[in-house]
Image: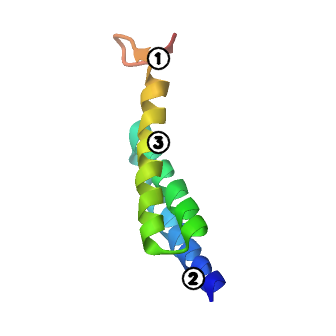
Amino acid sequence: MQFQTIKRAGLASALALSLTTAGCANMSDTDRRVGTGIGIGAVTGALISGNPGGTAVGAALGGAGGWLYDRNQKRHYYYDSRGRRVYR
């Protein structure tokens, strides 16, 4: 019984991740990193807890982690006067 719940939550999370990452071509780096964090967090939360609450908490923590990762990455570069990314 518990395995079926985990399987359904994992399948729903994987479907949501595939649907949200389908249009990543026009997204900024921040959007992609936060979205990836949300997807990974949701799947991990679903696999660990097996209930929708754990999936939501995992998605929230993953999104926060993706945002923090993005902020850290942006410390390592800046844009010059021509709009090109320059790494420090």
11 and 46: which is toward the camera = 46
**Total numbered labels:** 3
Nearest to viewer (mark 1 / mark 2): 2
Query: Which residue was labeled with disc 2?
Result: 5
From the top left corner, tell me how far across and down residue 7 is, in percent. Answer: 62, 79
From the top left corner, tell me how far across and down residue 31 is, in percent. Answer: 39, 44
Circle number at residue 77: 1
Specify the amino acid type for callout 2.
Thr
Q: Secondary structure at mark 2?
A: helix
Query: Which residue was labeled with disc 3?
Result: 66
Q: In this view of the protein, can residue 38 be seen by the observer?
A: yes
28 lies left or right of 8:
left
**Do the residues bearing badges 1 and 2 touch, measured as CB atoms within 8 Å?**
no
Residue ranking furthest to the right: 3
Labels 3 and 2: the sequence-earlier one: 2
Cα distance in 3D space between marks 1 and 2? 44 Å
Residue at point 41%, 64% (across, down): 56
Please, is residue 41 above or below residue 7 in the view? Answer: above
Query: Badge 1: few (under 14), some or many (20 or more) residues near its Cα, within 10 Å?
Result: few
Cα distance in 3D space between marks 3 and 2? 27 Å
Query: Badge 3: few (under 14), some or many (20 or more) residues near its Cα, within 10 Å?
Result: many
Residue at point 46%, 54% (across, down): 38
Q: Secondary structure at mark 1?
A: strand
Labels 1 and 2: the sequence-earlier one: 2
Specify the amino acid type for callout 3.
Gly
Quarter of the figure with residue 3: bottom right
**Do the residues bearing badges 1 and 3 touch, measured as CB atoms within 8 Å?**
no
Cα distance in 3D space between marks 1 and 3? 18 Å
Q: In this view of the protein, can residue 28 be seen by the observer?
A: no
Specify the amino acid type for callout 1.
Tyr
15 and 6: which is toward the camera = 6
